[in-house]
Amino acid sequence: MDSTCICVSCCVAGDHKGHEVEILDVASEKKKETLKPVSDKLSSRREEAEGRIKNLKEHETKEKEKSSGLAERVSGLFTDLRGKMDDLEKGVLSEIYRQEKQVSLSVSDMVKEVELHKDELTKKRNQLQGLCDITDPLAFLQESVIRGDIINQSCDVIGDVREAQSLDDVVVSQMLHRGLLRFADDLIDLKIKRQFPVMEKSENRPDGPKRFKSCQVFSSCSFSSGRHYWEVDVSQAKEWIIGVAGDSLERKVVGNKSFIGFNEKSWGLMVVNSLGVLHNNILRSLKSESPVKAVGIYLDYEAGRLSFYQLCDPIRHLHTFTASFTEPLYAAFYLYENCILRIMI
């Protein structure tokens, strides 16, 4: 069938003579029957499209709600962070102003002392001038013997500016660094508080020639130049040794020859019964008004200085080693039984 509509004359005598034909009503009904499945299919697809539109709009609504909630959490997080940073700024500035006041008081006391000394020098000068004004030789010599204490007394001037107290910018830097490290720890807590995921990674290290036989470990990176600072939380350790050691320190020896401070290639701060510093197996005891819970370590490689600080309020200097460093140095840690040390870097 070619689906062509023709008149009766064409069917009887025209070009379509002998062709199979149907009346319009019958052909129309048959055509409608063939189109019904298509219509049903289109209706089904239309309903499916409507469902997808509904799902997309619901998804849009949910994502808008999620976006709003996420934006609120992010804003809250940054509000918390700004608060932490403001507190840190206030604390560091307070330390600077405290040191400034301390320096001013110290200089003021020195100025008063020098003023008194200056007055004393003026008095002595006047006395000597009076002595020199005596014209009688005998009287002059007799008087000079009597006033010999003035002549023999030291006239050195006290109060050199090099003796004056100065601002300790290392302590300020350590305080700032410590605050930023604490800020990083607080960030994790704040992220948890604001329901943000926190990523953690743990890594096991295989045995090798660089590992010690004892419970001692070096940092993964070494220091061959520059200034470096790190902190160690020792609050969960009853006994410990921390410090720095040279790369050539033997790892596989038995006994304490490789321990931090028990040789000429390492310098350490330790708490074993009491607080002390150790180098080349020579122990020097230290005093502390309170238990050491955290330690700041400052290394100036070129200057040959290694300083230990007790991290309290205010930060307290414990000891400084001076040496000529000639090889790469590692941060070193000795852990006793049931000892937990946490590196805060």
Image (cartoon, helix red, strand yellow):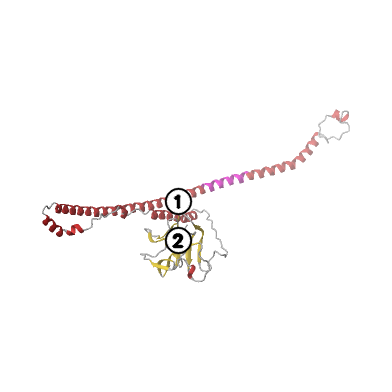
Question: How many badges with numbers are in the image?
Answer: 2
Image quarter of residue 45: top right
Q: Nearer the viewer, residue 288 or 152?
A: 152
> Can you identify the residue that label 2 sits on?
232
Magenta includes 272?
Answer: no
- Stretch in magenta: 53-68
Residue sitting at x 47%, y 48%: 75
Image quarter of residue 276: bottom left
- Residue 29: percent from left, percent from top: 78, 38
> Can you identify the residue that label 1 sits on?
81
Image quarter of residue 290: bottom left
- Residue 73: percent from left, percent from top: 49, 50
237 left or right, relative to 288: right
Is 108 situated above or below 233? above
Q: Nearer the viewer, residue 319 or 12?
A: 319
- Give the foreground label among 2 and 1: 2
118 left or right, relative to 62: left
Q: Residues within 10 Å of mark 1 (few under 14, many from 20)?
A: some
Residue sitting at x 18%, y 59%: 149
Magenta includes 65?
Answer: yes
Label 2 secondary element: strand
Q: Amino acid at mark 2?
A: Val
Q: Amino acid at mark 1?
A: Leu
- Give the mark nearest the N terminus, 2 or 1: 1
Question: Residue reaching furthest bottom?
Answer: 255
